[in-house]
Image (cartoon, helix red, strand yellow):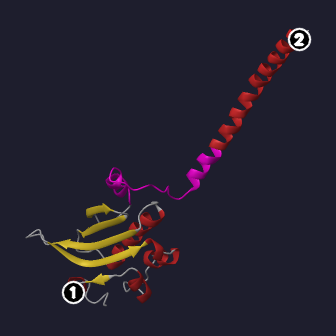
Amino acid sequence: MKPWTVLGGSILITTAAAILLPSLQMLDSGTAAVRETQATISPQQRVLLTDDNLVDTLNELPLTTPIASVSWEHSVLTLDVKLSKEETTPLEIYQNMAELAAFSFYGTTNVRQLLLRVVTEDEWSGERHLLLASDIRRNEWTNEALEQLRNREGAELPEDLKSRFRITVTPMWQNRFSGVYTN
Protein backbone atom coordinates (compact mmCIF):
# COMPACT_ATOMS: atom_id res chain seq x y z
CA MET A 1 0.00 0.00 0.00
CA LYS A 2 2.94 2.27 0.51
CA PRO A 3 3.77 2.57 -3.20
CA TRP A 4 0.20 3.73 -3.89
CA THR A 5 0.50 6.37 -1.16
CA VAL A 6 3.74 7.72 -2.63
CA LEU A 7 2.25 7.74 -6.14
CA GLY A 8 -0.97 9.39 -4.94
CA GLY A 9 1.00 12.02 -2.99
CA SER A 10 3.14 12.77 -6.04
CA ILE A 11 0.08 13.18 -8.25
CA LEU A 12 -1.56 15.43 -5.65
CA ILE A 13 1.55 17.65 -5.35
CA THR A 14 1.93 17.86 -9.15
CA THR A 15 -1.73 18.82 -9.59
CA ALA A 16 -1.50 21.45 -6.84
CA ALA A 17 1.64 22.92 -8.43
CA ALA A 18 -0.03 23.01 -11.85
CA ILE A 19 -2.96 24.94 -10.37
CA LEU A 20 -1.05 27.28 -8.04
CA LEU A 21 1.90 28.31 -10.25
CA PRO A 22 -0.21 30.21 -12.82
CA SER A 23 -1.96 32.09 -10.01
CA LEU A 24 1.44 33.08 -8.56
CA GLN A 25 2.43 34.40 -11.98
CA MET A 26 -0.75 36.50 -12.06
CA LEU A 27 0.19 37.99 -8.69
CA ASP A 28 3.62 38.93 -10.05
CA SER A 29 2.14 40.52 -13.17
CA GLY A 30 -0.13 42.56 -10.89
CA THR A 31 2.95 43.79 -9.04
CA ALA A 32 4.60 44.59 -12.37
CA ALA A 33 1.53 46.60 -13.38
CA VAL A 34 1.77 48.58 -10.14
CA ARG A 35 5.48 49.23 -10.77
CA GLU A 36 4.69 50.36 -14.32
CA THR A 37 1.99 52.71 -13.04
CA GLN A 38 4.35 54.17 -10.44
CA ALA A 39 6.98 54.73 -13.11
CA THR A 40 4.43 56.53 -15.27
CA ILE A 41 3.33 58.72 -12.37
CA SER A 42 6.90 59.60 -11.35
CA PRO A 43 7.80 63.01 -12.78
CA GLN A 44 11.29 62.03 -13.79
CA GLN A 45 13.29 58.84 -13.69
CA ARG A 46 16.60 59.23 -11.91
CA VAL A 47 19.57 58.15 -13.96
CA LEU A 48 23.12 57.26 -13.11
CA LEU A 49 25.07 59.77 -15.19
CA THR A 50 28.07 58.27 -16.99
CA ASP A 51 30.35 59.20 -19.86
CA ASP A 52 28.31 56.83 -22.03
CA ASN A 53 24.90 58.47 -21.48
CA LEU A 54 25.96 62.07 -20.78
CA VAL A 55 25.32 63.60 -24.21
CA ASP A 56 22.08 61.72 -24.87
CA THR A 57 20.69 62.56 -21.44
CA LEU A 58 21.55 66.26 -21.65
CA ASN A 59 20.18 66.44 -25.18
CA GLU A 60 16.71 65.53 -23.86
CA LEU A 61 16.54 68.58 -21.56
CA PRO A 62 14.13 71.34 -22.63
CA LEU A 63 16.68 74.17 -22.73
CA THR A 64 16.23 77.36 -24.74
CA THR A 65 19.96 78.06 -24.86
CA PRO A 66 22.34 75.51 -26.38
CA ILE A 67 25.03 73.71 -24.41
CA ALA A 68 28.42 74.75 -25.79
CA SER A 69 30.56 72.30 -23.81
CA VAL A 70 30.21 69.70 -21.10
CA SER A 71 32.59 67.92 -18.76
CA TRP A 72 31.92 65.08 -16.30
CA GLU A 73 34.55 64.23 -13.69
CA HIS A 74 34.32 62.84 -10.15
CA SER A 75 30.59 63.62 -9.68
CA VAL A 76 31.07 67.20 -10.91
CA LEU A 77 29.10 68.24 -13.99
CA THR A 78 30.54 71.29 -15.75
CA LEU A 79 28.46 73.00 -18.42
CA ASP A 80 28.93 76.01 -20.65
CA VAL A 81 25.64 77.39 -21.92
CA LYS A 82 26.03 79.65 -24.94
CA LEU A 83 23.79 82.61 -25.59
CA SER A 84 23.11 82.41 -29.29
CA LYS A 85 20.69 85.28 -29.73
CA GLU A 86 20.80 88.90 -28.61
CA GLU A 87 17.26 88.87 -27.25
CA THR A 88 17.99 86.22 -24.59
CA THR A 89 16.82 87.64 -21.25
CA PRO A 90 18.14 87.05 -17.73
CA LEU A 91 14.82 85.36 -16.88
CA GLU A 92 15.36 82.84 -19.68
CA ILE A 93 18.88 82.19 -18.42
CA TYR A 94 17.61 81.65 -14.85
CA GLN A 95 14.96 79.22 -16.08
CA ASN A 96 17.63 77.24 -17.93
CA MET A 97 19.78 77.28 -14.79
CA ALA A 98 16.81 75.91 -12.82
CA GLU A 99 16.23 73.19 -15.42
CA LEU A 100 19.89 72.14 -15.32
CA ALA A 101 19.99 72.15 -11.52
CA ALA A 102 16.74 70.17 -11.28
CA PHE A 103 18.11 67.62 -13.72
CA SER A 104 21.45 67.41 -11.88
CA PHE A 105 20.04 66.96 -8.39
CA TYR A 106 16.60 65.40 -8.91
CA GLY A 107 17.09 63.61 -12.22
CA THR A 108 20.39 61.92 -11.42
CA THR A 109 21.74 59.90 -8.56
CA ASN A 110 25.40 60.85 -8.77
CA VAL A 111 25.86 64.55 -9.58
CA ARG A 112 27.31 66.17 -6.47
CA GLN A 113 28.15 69.57 -7.94
CA LEU A 114 27.07 71.60 -10.98
CA LEU A 115 29.48 74.18 -12.34
CA LEU A 116 27.56 76.30 -14.79
CA ARG A 117 28.89 79.08 -16.98
CA VAL A 118 26.94 81.31 -19.32
CA VAL A 119 29.09 82.39 -22.26
CA THR A 120 28.69 84.37 -25.42
CA GLU A 121 30.75 84.06 -28.57
CA ASP A 122 32.16 86.92 -30.60
CA GLU A 123 30.83 86.31 -34.10
CA TRP A 124 33.91 87.83 -35.76
CA SER A 125 36.73 86.24 -33.79
CA GLY A 126 34.91 83.15 -32.50
CA GLU A 127 36.29 83.92 -29.04
CA ARG A 128 34.12 82.99 -26.05
CA HIS A 129 33.44 85.47 -23.27
CA LEU A 130 32.18 84.58 -19.79
CA LEU A 131 29.02 86.37 -18.65
CA LEU A 132 27.95 84.47 -15.53
CA ALA A 133 29.31 81.58 -13.48
CA SER A 134 27.71 79.57 -10.70
CA ASP A 135 28.72 76.73 -8.42
CA ILE A 136 25.65 74.79 -7.28
CA ARG A 137 26.00 71.88 -4.83
CA ARG A 138 23.56 69.07 -4.13
CA ASN A 139 23.74 69.46 -0.36
CA GLU A 140 22.75 73.14 -0.62
CA TRP A 141 19.96 72.71 -3.16
CA THR A 142 16.30 72.90 -2.06
CA ASN A 143 12.87 72.82 -3.70
CA GLU A 144 12.37 76.40 -2.52
CA ALA A 145 15.54 77.50 -4.32
CA LEU A 146 14.38 75.75 -7.47
CA GLU A 147 11.03 77.55 -7.37
CA GLN A 148 12.72 80.90 -6.70
CA LEU A 149 14.92 80.43 -9.74
CA ARG A 150 12.14 79.12 -11.99
CA ASN A 151 9.53 81.71 -11.10
CA ARG A 152 11.45 84.96 -11.09
CA GLU A 153 9.18 87.98 -11.21
CA GLY A 154 12.11 90.25 -11.94
CA ALA A 155 15.56 89.83 -13.33
CA GLU A 156 17.31 90.55 -10.03
CA LEU A 157 18.06 87.43 -7.96
CA PRO A 158 17.60 87.45 -4.17
CA GLU A 159 20.83 87.73 -2.18
CA ASP A 160 20.41 84.31 -0.54
CA LEU A 161 20.13 82.69 -3.98
CA LYS A 162 23.22 84.52 -5.24
CA SER A 163 25.30 83.38 -2.29
CA ARG A 164 23.87 79.84 -2.16
CA PHE A 165 24.74 79.25 -5.83
CA ARG A 166 27.95 81.29 -5.73
CA ILE A 167 26.83 83.34 -8.72
CA THR A 168 29.41 85.67 -10.18
CA VAL A 169 28.78 88.01 -13.08
CA THR A 170 31.28 89.78 -15.29
CA PRO A 171 31.26 93.40 -16.48
CA MET A 172 30.18 92.01 -19.87
CA TRP A 173 26.98 90.65 -18.25
CA GLN A 174 26.35 94.01 -16.63
CA ASN A 175 26.88 95.82 -19.94
CA ARG A 176 24.70 93.41 -21.88
CA PHE A 177 21.82 93.50 -19.42
CA SER A 178 22.48 97.11 -18.35
CA GLY A 179 22.47 96.76 -14.60
CA VAL A 180 19.81 94.06 -14.36
CA TYR A 181 22.09 92.12 -12.04
CA THR A 182 24.76 93.73 -9.91
CA ASN A 183 27.05 92.23 -7.32
Residue at 32 percent across and 53 percent down: it is 51
Rendering quarter of residue 58: bottom left
Closer to the observer: label 1 or label 2?
2
Q: Quadrant of residue 6?
A: top right
Where residue 73 sits in the image (x, y, percent)? 32, 62
> Viewer-proximal residue, 59 or 116?
116
**Can you say which quadrant of the picture contains the N terminus?**
top right
Quarter occupied by the C terminus: bottom left
Q: In the displayed image of the protein, which residue is found farthest to the right?
A: 1
**In this view of the protein, which residue sits in the foreground, 112 or 56?**
112
Q: Is residue 148 visible?
A: yes
Instruction: Verify whether residue 46 appears in magenta.
Output: yes
**Residue 80: image x %, image y %?**
27, 68
Element assignment for label 1: helix
Query: In the figure, is residue 136 to the left or right of 122?
Result: right
Q: Position of residue 159 (x, y in %)?
A: 41, 89
Query: Magenta stretch?
Result: 33-61
Q: Residues within 10 Å of mark 2 (few under 14, many from 20)?
A: few
Q: Image point 27% across, 83% down: which residue?
A: 169
Residue, disc 1: 171
Q: Is residue 120 above or below residue 71?
A: below
Q: Say if the magenta span includes residue 52.
A: yes
Residue 2 numbered mark, or none = 2
Q: Could you tell me which secondary element the residue under label 2 belongs to?
A: helix
